[in-house]
């Protein structure tokens, strides 16, 4: 069954320029589809069209009847006094309405036992059970914990949350709503590794349809089954995850290039033959003219094919400074707190030349603070750290700022990097700032553009210790690959904070996990680290099981005393049931004229009598 059909879709924001130009594809029920393409190609526009937020110029879009869509990036406006908990509860608004009606019906049935009310009560009770009404609280806690929405955040006003926190809460609300079709627009942007892994596991179990726009290649590899690339306003399908897409795209490019080269060779051959035939035709053969004209028509058809072009890769390289010595960084007894919150303590770390270290951990664990301590932007509470005498650092912070927001990108390069105009333009062009882009004030740049500009500036410095705090945030896949190409040739010490597992796996030769105020120092790549962590978890579980076995057990109590207590409990239960049966008899006398009520009482008496008979048999056995 098809959930979404997009046919010949055209959307333009400017006259004569179509951002979507004949886009066509279908999505089957339960499919997990990745939407790929460079920034600005129309991915978010497509999602806004699917939800009906904006219209389109031509073509058609259809969603299967009765299917509900939910868009992560589209955060509804809630009442000002709503807390985060109110937003989460809003996902169960239908169940709360059913619950309220059931309470009303319960009060009405005390006075009126009409068949219509009884049927409505039975129907709503079944709906409440079927839709998970009894598990609402459990589901809310499970999803909130998975996406790291704390109890404190659940009590905050939703309007007071940051943009990233609102996105997380909105994602939780859509998951709780059990939406049929999830549209995920960069869902992992504000999630740390733990929350991202939780989301991946949820999506793998999700029975509905998923369309995901993401620059997280690891996420795309794990979650999506098929990819659609939007290029020049059209869709090209790839029947696999991101890794399959990369290989298949390259294969198709090479195939198109070979076809183009064959066509060019054929054009050259036919052109020479046509010219020769025209020459021979002047010697008295009109038939040769006709054959030459026929060849020229074939040449015209072959000339319509354009030469396929490959994406230009970043051709830049960090300037490196020779490192003399063994130790790049040493810390001893390092501790840092903010108020009553202790981030870490007693950190003992040593970094030597050429190491590539990934610093990972949950949001708020203190990763950026540790980086700021290394850069002497913060002061430790206790302990010390030192850099080697020949160490020259370069730092890309998470929040980018420049000396003057009113300066253009070109002027910023000229003033801050002390380079010549042509060198500045060449370096900016390598990072995607071309033409009029170089005159854009840096204050007007997007987050991703600011990161690119700052990296462009770092490229010109002589460095041997490069520190990056979330370097791939806000960057599309092409920009991430540009940075990776540049870092691949960098041979000195690298320390980076990242949630991008693809990036971590590619560069880390050592992993620092900052957790519960301590650093777990693992020497190896990210995949090896994950396997080691899993082995550690298995070992810890087996240790707990062994410990339980070794715990001294309470001495077994004598059979006689145990039997006595069982006999006492059985007698009490028999007494309780006999009292309830007597009460039912009295209640039956009061409702002698109410047939429906008598049926209910009789059914309960039958159940209790059966239980009472079993207890009599148990009492007899214990007495003997």
Image: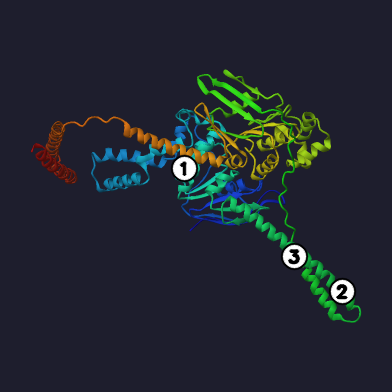
Instruction: Choose the circle earlier in sequence order: 2 or 1.
Output: 1
Residue at the image position 66 percent from the left and 38 percent from the top: 448
Mark 3 residue crowding within 10 angstroms, few (<14) / some (14–19) / many (20+): few
Residue 231 visible within the image: yes
Residue that label 3 marks: 262
Which marked residue is nearer to the observer: mark 2 or mark 1?
Answer: 2
Residue at the image position 13 percent from the left and 38 percent from the top: 581
Q: Quadrant of residue 386?
A: top right
Q: Is residue 302 left or right of residue 342?
A: right
Above or below residue 35? Residue 353 is above
Which marked residue is nearer to the observer: mark 1 or mark 3?
Answer: 3
Which residue is nearer to you in this view: 20 or 60?
20
Q: Position of residue 290 (x, y in %)?
A: 82, 77
Which residue is nearer to you in this view: 548 or 127?
548
**Residue 565: image tag:** none
Instruction: Choose the circle earlier in sequence order: 1 or 3.
Output: 1
Q: Position of residue 470 (x, y in %)?
A: 62, 35
Q: Position of residue 483 (x, y in %)?
A: 68, 40
CA separation, marks 2 and 3?
21 Å
Mark 1 residue crowding within 10 angstroms, few (<14) / some (14–19) / many (20+): many
Above or below residue 53? Residue 273 is below
Q: Secondary structure at mark 1?
A: helix
Which residue is nearer to you in this view: 511 or 130?
511
Residue that label 1 marks: 175
Query: Which residue appears farthest toward the left when viewing the image?
Result: 624
Query: Which residue appears farthest toward the top when viewing the image?
Result: 382
Q: Secondary structure at mark 2?
A: helix
Residue that label 2 marks: 276
Residue 51 visible within the image: no
Which marked residue is nearer to the observer: mark 2 or mark 3?
Answer: 3
């Amino acid at each position: 069954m098809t959930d979404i059909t997009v046919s010949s879709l055209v959307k333009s924001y400017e006259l004569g320029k179509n951002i979507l130009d004949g886009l066509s594809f279908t999505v089957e029920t339960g499919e997990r589809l990745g939407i790929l393409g460079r920034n600005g190609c129309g991915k978010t526009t497509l999602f806004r069209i699917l939800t009906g937020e904006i219209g389109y110029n031509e073509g058609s879009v259809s969603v299967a009847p009765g299917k509900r869509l939910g868009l992560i990036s589209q955060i509804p406006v809630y009442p000002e006094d709503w807390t985060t908990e109110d937003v989460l509860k809003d996902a169960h608004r239908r169940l709360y309405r059913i619950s309220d009606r059931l309470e009303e019906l319960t009060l009405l049935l005390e006075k009126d036992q009409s068949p219509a009310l009884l049927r409505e009560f039975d129907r709503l009770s079944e709906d409440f059970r079927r839709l998970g009404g009894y598990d609402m609280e459990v589901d809310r806690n499970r999803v909130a914990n998975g996406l790291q929405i704390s109890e404190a955040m659940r009590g905050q006003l939703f309007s007071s949350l940051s943009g990233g926190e609102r996105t997380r809460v909105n994602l939780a609300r859509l998951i709780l709503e059990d939406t049929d079709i999830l549209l995920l627009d960069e869902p992992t942007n504000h999630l740390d590794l733990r929350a991202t892994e939780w989301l991946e596991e949820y999506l793998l179990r999700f029975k509905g349809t998923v369309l995901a726009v993401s620059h997280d290649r690891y996420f795309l590899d794990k979650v999506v089954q098929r990819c659609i690339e939007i290029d020049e306003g059209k869709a090209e399908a790839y029947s696999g995850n991101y890794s399959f897409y990369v290989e298949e795209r390259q294969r198709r490019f090479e195939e198109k290039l070979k076809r183009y080269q064959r066509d060019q060779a054929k054009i050259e051959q036919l052109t020479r033959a046509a010219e020769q035939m025209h020459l021979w035709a002047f010697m008295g053969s009109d038939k040769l003219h006709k054959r030459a004209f026929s060849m020229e028509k074939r040449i015209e058809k072959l000339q319509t094919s354009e030469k396929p072009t490959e994406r230009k890769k970043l051709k830049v390289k960090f300037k490196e400074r020779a490192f003399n010595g063994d130790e790049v960084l040493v810390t001893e007894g390092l501790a840092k707190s903010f108020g009553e919150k202790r981030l870490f303590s007693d950190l003992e770390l040593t970094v030597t030349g050429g190491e590539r270290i990934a610093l990972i951990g949950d949001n708020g664990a203190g990763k950026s603070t540790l980086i700021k301590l290394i850069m002497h932007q913060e002061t430790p509470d206790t302990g010390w750290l030192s850099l080697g005498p020949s160490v020259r650092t370069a730092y890309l912070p998470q929040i980018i700022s420049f000396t003057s927001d009113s300066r253009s990108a070109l002027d910023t390069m000229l003033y801050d990097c002390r380079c010549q105009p042509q060198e500045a333009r060449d370096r900016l062009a390598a990072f995607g700032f071309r033409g009029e882009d170089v005159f854009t004030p840096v204050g007007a740049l997007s987050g991703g553009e600011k990161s690119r500009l700052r990296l462009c500036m770092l490229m010109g410095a002589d460095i041997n210790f490069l520190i990056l705090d979330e370097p791939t945030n806000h960057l599309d896949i092409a920009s991430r690959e540009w940075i990776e190409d540049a870092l691949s040739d960098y041979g000195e010490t690298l320390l980076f904070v990242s949630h991008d597992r693809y990036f971590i796996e590619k560069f880390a030769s050592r992993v620092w996990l900052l957790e519960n105020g301590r650093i777990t120092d693992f020497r190896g790549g990210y995949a090896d680290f994950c396997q080691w962590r899993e082995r550690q978890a298995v070992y810890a579980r087996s240790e707990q099981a062994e410990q339980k076995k070794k715990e001294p057990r309470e001495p077994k109590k004598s059979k006689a005393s145990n039997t006595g207590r069982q006999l006492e409990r059985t007698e009490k239960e028999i007494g309780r049931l006999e009292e309830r049966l007597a009460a039912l008899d009295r209640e039956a006398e009061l409702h002698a004229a109410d047939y429906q009520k008598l049926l209910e009482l009789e059914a309960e008496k039958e159940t209790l009598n059966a239980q009472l008979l079993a207890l009599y048999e148990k009492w007899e056995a214990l007495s003997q």
